[in-house]
């Protein structure tokens, strides 16, 4: 009697255990599927963001590795929030309110973390793509399942299919995947296709204006012949417009007729070994005007501002004249440099901006020649082309 009564109980326990095991197995499979879907969503977000970002990236630039790693992390964080939290919200209005709030908070947080300052304005288009990345995630998460269900039912109706195991059904379901893959490949092939727009945005941020002038032609002139103002002519102008020199270093530093010049946004002062950075105001104004004209001329040809020429020699004092005569027997105490009216500009040494379109040395040299030629024609200065010293010797008139 006891054996008969316990057998059904044992069978029932076995069935319950089997059901529990099946449920556990299903839960494990479901958990793995969710992980795969989460990784897939995050990866899709990265590839969309990267593809769009590269459309605005100039062909000469690349995305730094640390920048890509940051974007991967942001995509996985966003994907986790969207897949595991956002999709569980039941009410539609609350769901989209949370989505809008997350997009706003996301932009604020990455801005607070210094994301927008990294890499300068070269990556401005890429940063915009990252900013709108959560939008793609919410759209994909909210529409992807519905789209697949609608698309699958459409295929079954068109081909009168009764089972999703049909080869026809599987082939047609792969079409959207193939289209997405082709879009990603096409996105990478279009890398830099909007780079001019990105350059315009970058130029507007850096300069406050956009310039599309692409005329890079320079007049061909024999500058060594044009810049041939004799030393006697320059010396006469130096005596007329400058101080009575040479002075000692201490006298020059305390002379109110002289102004100190320093490296600034228009030009760079080289490490001076045989002169000190002082000029009469008229010569200092000429130097600054040449720096401005140099930058404006490059900007009008499509280059960013920030290019600067280098000043290699300025005012010579009694001490520097003595030092120079030890190494150069041809140097004279009656040099134009002793009057505070003369400076040398190297035609080989320049500094360039960290961002934007950078001019070549040949281009900058041609622009420097053109600026000096214009100033010479305006009777503002005398210019001598110094071949051995690789500089332009300029005296204010």
Image: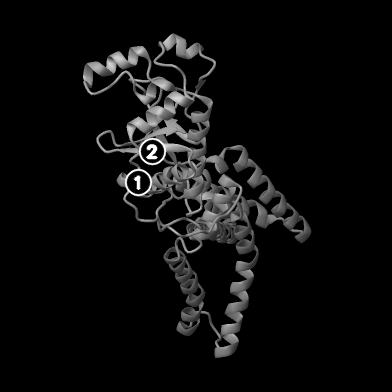
Q: Nearer the viewer, residue 77 or 284?
A: 284
Residue 233, x across and y down, in percent: 37, 33
Residue 395 visible in the shown view: yes
Q: Residues within 10 Å of mark 1 (few under 14, many from 20)?
A: some
Is residue 191 shown left or right of residue 272? right
Q: Is 205 left or right of 374, judged from the image as shown?
A: right
Considering only vertical position in the picture, is 37 above or below 123?
Answer: below
Front one among 69 and 218? 218
Residue 59 vs residue 32, the one in the foreground: 59
Looking at the image, do the residues carrying marks 2 and 1 touch, with CB atoms under 8 Å apart?
Answer: yes
Per the image, the residue denoted by label 2 is 383
Residue at (51, 20) in percent of width and height: 258
Label 1, on which residue? 226
Question: Within 10 Å of the Cα at label 2, are there few (<14), some (14-19), or many (20+) other Cα atoms?
Answer: many
How much space separates mark 2 and mark 1, taking CA atoms? 8 Å
Counting from the top left corner in percent of width and height, residue 34 is at 54, 57
Q: Residue at x 42, y 48 (%)?
A: 370
Badge 2 or badge 1: first in the primary sequence: 1
Q: Position of residue 318 (x, y in %)?
A: 35, 13
């Amino acid at each position: 009697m006891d054996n008969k009564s316990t057998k059904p109980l044992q069978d029932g326990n076995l069935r319950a255990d089997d059901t529990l095991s099946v449920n556990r197995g299903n839960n494990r499979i479901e958990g793995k599927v969710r992980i795969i879907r989460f990784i897939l969503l995050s990866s899709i977000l990265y590839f969309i963001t990267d593809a769009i970002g590269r459309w605005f990236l100039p062909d000469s630039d690349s995305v730094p590795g640390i920048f890509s790693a940051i974007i991967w992390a942001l995509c996985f964080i966003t994907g986790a929030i969207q897949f595991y939290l956002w999709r569980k919200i039941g009410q539609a209005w609350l769901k989209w309110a949370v989505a809008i709030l997350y997009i706003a908070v996301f932009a604020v947080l990455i801005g607070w973390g210094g994301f927008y300052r990294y890499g300068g304005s070269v990556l401005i288009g890429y940063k915009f793509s990252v900013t709108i990345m959560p939008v793609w995630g919410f759209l994909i998460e909210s529409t992807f399942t519905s789209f697949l269900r609608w698309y699958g039912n459409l295929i079954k109706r068109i081909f009168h299919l009764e089972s999703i195991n049909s080869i026809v059904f599987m082939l047609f379901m792969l079409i959207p995947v193939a289209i997405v893959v082709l879009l990603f490949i096409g996105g990478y092939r279009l890398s830099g296709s909007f780079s001019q727009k990105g350059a315009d945005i970058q130029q507007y941020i850096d300069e406050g204006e956009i310039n599309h002038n692409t005329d890079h032609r320079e007049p061909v002139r024999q500058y060594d012949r044009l810049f041939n103002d004799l030393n006697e002519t320059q010396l006469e102008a130096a005596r007329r417009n400058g101080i009575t020199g040479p002075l000692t270093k201490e006298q020059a530093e305390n002379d109110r007729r002289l102004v100190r010049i320093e490296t600034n946004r228009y030009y760079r002062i080289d490490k001076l070994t045989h002169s000190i950075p002082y000029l009469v105001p008229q010569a200092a104004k000429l130097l600054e005007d040449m720096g401005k004209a140099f930058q404006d001329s490059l900007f009008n040809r499509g280059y960013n501002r920030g290019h600067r020429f280098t000043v290699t020699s300025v005012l010579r004092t009694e001490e520097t004249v003595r030092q120079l005569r030890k190494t150069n027997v041809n140097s004279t105490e009656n040099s134009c440099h002793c009057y505070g009216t003369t400076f040398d500009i190297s035609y080989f040494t320049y500094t360039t901006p960290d961002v934007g379109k950078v001019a070549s040395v040949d281009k900058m040299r041609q622009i420097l020649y053109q600026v000096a030629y214009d100033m010479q024609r305006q009777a503002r200065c005398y210019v001598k082309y110094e071949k051995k010293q690789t500089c332009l010797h300029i005296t204010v008139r």
